[in-house]
Structures are given as structure tokens and as C-alpha cells.
Image: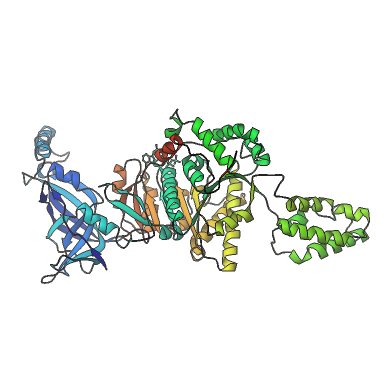
Amino acid sequence: MTKLEKFEFLKINGKEVSGTLMKIEPSENTRYSYEVWFPYALEYINEIREGRFLAVKNFATKDAEEHWSILEVTFIEPLHYAIHNISKSHYPHFAETAAKNASIDWEIQTDAPKYPTTRIIVDAIPTNLEIVDDGSDKYELQEETNIPMLGKEVYILDNETTQEIINKGMNKGYIEAGSWTIGNEVKIRINVEELLRKHFGIFGFTGAGKSNLLSTLIRKITEYSIDNEPVKLVIWDLMSEYYGLLLDVLCKYDGYLIAIGEKTFPDSTLEYLKTKDSSKLTQAAEDLVKTMVFPKDIKNNSNIFPKAAIEITKKLLKCDKVRLLVPEYTVDDLVHKYPPWEGRRKGAGPWQTISKVVGRTFGEYRGKDVIVTPELAEKLLNKLESELRGKSEDIKESFGKIKLALENIKTRTGTPMALGITTSQIIELLNSKDNPNILIFVSHDPNQIRNTSWELGTRLYEERRKNGVITPTTVFIFDEADEFIPQDVDKRNESYKHSSDIAMKLARRGRKFGLGLGIATQRIRYLNTSILAQPHTYFVSKLPRKTDREAVAEAFGLGLDMFNQTFKFKKGDWLVISHDALGMEAVPIPVHFENANIKVIEFLNNLPEHCCGRTEVTD
Ligand SMILES: Nc1ncnc2c1ncn2[C@@H]1O[C@H](COP(=O)(O)OP(=O)(O)OP(=O)(O)O)[C@@H](O)[C@H]1O
């Protein structure tokens, strides 16, 4: 039970407006659906909007204790008695004249209803909550205990009461994610842990603002996370669009742009990553900006683009925040990659000698997936050296390639990649409790992104499982999720299977190790349907195709009419529905989110001195 500070009805022109509950019907998805008739006035219809909350007395009311069921408006239709039943069977001229005459009533009833011929017909669904008013000035908000009384007055809740109800029980661990589309003074809180650990999905048509919303959420969560439990956000970015959307976040916090595969970045950028040679910095930054995708709003700003974007990229490069993923090998990988018995006849004397050396040096790691760290490389080199002592030059030569590979791993710190990063280092970052981290993975090859998500995810999951690690909360975010978790896995391409496997694993079993999943897509029908049912929080925008709406509705147990309000949405408006992360369970709330582009533009207009977070750098 939650105490409400306030329980007041909305006043329009100083008057509480009420309608009448005219119909209650059973509904498959929402238990009940309701029809409420309000008197018509122009100002009323502008206030009674989809997403507003209504209150009507229910059958638990007794004596001095009133129980008010809370309903949510899902659809609105103005009704004029004189036009409503006109059809094509009527004589057209009479029908049109009647319609024209009647339409005057819409305009002349501006601030108050005048005629009994007009009404506002409202469809509503239960929120499953009720307010209990015992006559004192204390109000309780609790689970609904009975159904509304048919024929009773229905009132509109005012914005302050709405804010309290929407954010019920949200006293800590939340971000103010956006504002209610109906009144922007009503701020919507989202619980960060619940959002991330129980998975989220973002579904909207192309251009609806999915990447914009994702980057706004990432920005807010990272800001929150600085003073709270650190959160780790890993973005698998097929389109290279998150660098431009999160420049400020990468700069202010411990964030990295990580390329998978040497061909991902232009030569000059790669050269800088190899050498950290400051004479190559400007070219490296200019070329990197050219290969990343920036939103039009940013690109059209000639005072910041590309100049400020290049400046900030130089700072990010200087602060080691742009990296290349350096492959890592297990001991078995190395033996298979550089087989010392290559070219030898199996069973012959030298073959047996080589086998013995291999067995004694590497045997204990066989089949164990042990990564060759610089320390292990040194140990293996010493062991190999002693095993080869006294052996012929010919035998020693057979181990030349594997020795060189081990030497390279041993001295990895200085060469050959100054700004490399290995999977082990990334896992260390994701398990460290010091800072929030944002990692954006990009690649020229989508297969490599999919495979890397699997490699990193599997190792992280296994490490956390083996060691019983449950924090920090780490989320894998797949934009263009249908490219990672498709309905039909292309059997000829293993990478789809890999990314699907890790996404499924995180969705089904990640939670107990603090691992979550975020997915965003416009092509819901191409997404594996079993992943669609996993997120506990949904952000839904315009979905013009009915099949997409049906897929979302079915996965979340919503009625299709819930989507009606999304058709009127402006850019940045999203319907947010959650089982755990919002104050109201499974009640869709229309929320407006700030435009991430504006944040980046502001940032680029006021460039910071450096991007190294808490570390100082010298030129
Ligand atoms: N919250 C917002 N407020 C204002 N404008 C927005 C908002 N979100 C997005 N937009 C506008 O919509 C544009 C498209 O947004 P975005 O690129 O995020 O869409 P998308 O759904 O990811 O598109 P696609 O499916 O093509 O990747 C933005 O560049 C911006 O101009």
C-alpha cells in the first residue's frame, strides 16, 4: 500500500469535469474494458487524452470509506447525435446539410458544454489500482478490490495526483527518464536495476527515434550510475551510429569505441592505434569522423560539424578511448595455429620427440580453454626452453613459430598495438566495481560483431557463474536486433547462431549474474519470437504494420487498441510498459524523451579540455 499526498480531480475552467460510466465489458487482455461518456466542449476534448487517468467509485465503497478505481483512457471519439448515424443510404444532400449544420456545435461549445446532442466517448482499461478515501486527508493507493459501479460519475485525475500514482513506490534507484506526454511537469521515473536486469525492448518504425531514445537512456543511466552502483553498458553497433550519439558520454565517463577487425577503421586511425604517434593524431581523427554515422541534426550544424567532432575525437584518441580489439588465444589455439610437427611424418622419431615436448609444455592446459596471458606466455616460454635443451637444431626450429607467438603475447604492452584491448581486459573492466563503463563495438564485418558478442558474452557469463559474481549490472544492447536474433537463423552462417545463443542465454539466465539484455528493432516480425517475450520493459512507438503491433501485443499481453495512441505520437514520444521498472505494473504510460542530438550539440559547442575522465593528461 502506498500513501498518496494528494487526491484531486482535474478542473477545467475552475470546474471538476465528470462523465458517466456507461459500459463494462470483459476483455481477454485487460480483464475489463470500459466506456465513459463525457459532455462535449472543445477544451474538454483537448484535456481528455489517451493516457489520462480517470477515477470512478467501485463496489468496495462502504459507509464513509470510498474506493475509487483508476482507469486509463485508451481511445477518444467525439460523438454528435445528429451525424453519428448518417450513412451512404441517406439522401446525400440532406445528409451533408445535416452534417454541416451539426458541425457548428463542435466550435461554439468552447469552454463549457451547451447541447445534449454532443458527447466525448472514451474507452478505458483498468489499471488494477484503487484509491481509498476514508474522509480524512490520507489516501491509500492499493490493488483494486472490486469493479467500478456502472452509471457512476467518472472524474479525471489531476496532474499532481497522476504523478504520484505513476511513480508509486519509486523512492530510490531511479532515473527521471522523461515526461508524461500529457503534462510535461509530470516526470516519469524508471528503476535502473529493474530496467537493466530484467531486460528491455525498443520497438518503433524506422525514424521513430530508437537510437536517439537508446542514447538518452544510456546517458541518463551512466550519469545516475556515477553516484550509485556502477553499471556497464555494452552496445553492439552494426551501423556505427552510437559514437556520434554518445560523444559526450564517451568523453565524460569511462567509455570506449572498440573496433573489431583491422579493416574497421581507416588506415590513418589504425596507424595511430598502433603507434600512438602524436604527429598522426589529426589525420586519424579526421578520418575516423568520416567513417562514423552522425545524425543529420548534428551534421547540419556547420559551427560544430565536422570541426568540433574532430576536436573531440582527437581528445578521445589521446585519452586511449578508441581501441582495436586484439585477438586472444587459448593454449590449444596456439598449438593448432602453429603446429610444431607440421611437415613431419607421423610416428617417426622427430615426430615423437616433438609430441613429447608439446605434451610436457602445453599438455596440462589441453581442452581447458586457458587464455595465454603475458604471464602465462612467459611461463610457457621458460618451460619450452628447458624442454628443448639438448635437442637438435632441427627440432628447436619446429617450435620457432609458436615461440614467436608467445614472445609477442609476452611483450604485448609496448607493441605491436599501442591502443589494443583484449577480451580479458574487457572482462576485467566489466567486472570492476570502480566506474560505470560504456563500450561501443563497431566492425566493418557484421559477422565479426555477432561472433564477438558471443565470445565476450559467453566468457563473461561463464566467469561470473564459476565465481558466483553477481555485480556490476552489465547489459548487452543489440540495436537492429533482428540482425542478431533473427527468426530464421541462416544455417550457412554460424555468426547468427552465435549472437542468438548469447542473447537467449542472457535473457533466460543472465539475471542471476547481473547480466541483462536490451534489444531495439523496427522489424519485429523478423525477430526470434521467443526473445520478444523476455523483456519486462517495453518502449513502443509508431508501428504502422498490424503484424508488428500484434507481435508486441501478444508478447506483453496487451490489447491492440493500446496502440491507437501511438499513431498520434510526435518524435520522442514512446509508450512505456513495464512489469517491474515503472511505478505502475503493466500499465502503458505515454512518455516524451529528450532529444539526444541536442545534448551532443550542446556538448560540441562547449568542448571540454580533455576526455580522460578522472585522469589528467599532458600534451
Ligand atoms: N526525443 C526526440 N525529440 C526530438 N526529435 C527526435 C527525438 N528522437 C528522435 N528525433 C528525431 O528523429 C530522428 C531519427 O531518430 P533515430 O535516428 O534515433 O531513429 P531510428 O528509429 O533509430 O531510425 P532508424 O530505424 O532509421 O535507425 C533524429 O535524428 C531526430 O531528428
Q: Position of residue 148 (x, y in %)?
A: 18, 64
**Above or below — where is 59 with respect to 191?**
below
**Above or below — where is 604 with respect to 470?**
above
**Residue at position x 47%, y 49% from top?**
526
Q: Of 225 and 342, which appears nearest the observer?
A: 225
| Residue at the extreme top | 302
Q: Can residue 440 be seen?
A: no
Write down the quadrant of residue 290 in the picture: top right
**Above or below — where is 600 with respect to 72?**
above
| Residue at the extreme bottom | 63
Q: Is residue 131 left or right of residue 365?
A: left
Quarter of the rendered structure image containing ligand 1: top left
Q: Of 43 and 309, which appears nearest the observer?
A: 309
Q: Of 493 and 156, which appears nearest the observer?
A: 156
Quadrant where the C terminus is found in the figure: top right
Q: Can residue 489 be seen?
A: yes
Q: Position of residue 396 (x, y in %)?
A: 89, 55
Quadrant where the N terminus is found in the figure: bottom left
**Above or below — where is 413 with respect to 265?**
below
Marks counted in the figure total 0
Q: Position of residue 447 (x, y in %)?
A: 60, 47
Q: Of 281 and 338, which appears nearest the observer?
A: 281
**Residue at position x 61%, y 49% from top?**
493
Write down the quadrant of residue 63 in the picture: bottom left
Specify the color scheme.
rainbow
Q: Position of residue 467 (x, y in %)?
A: 59, 68
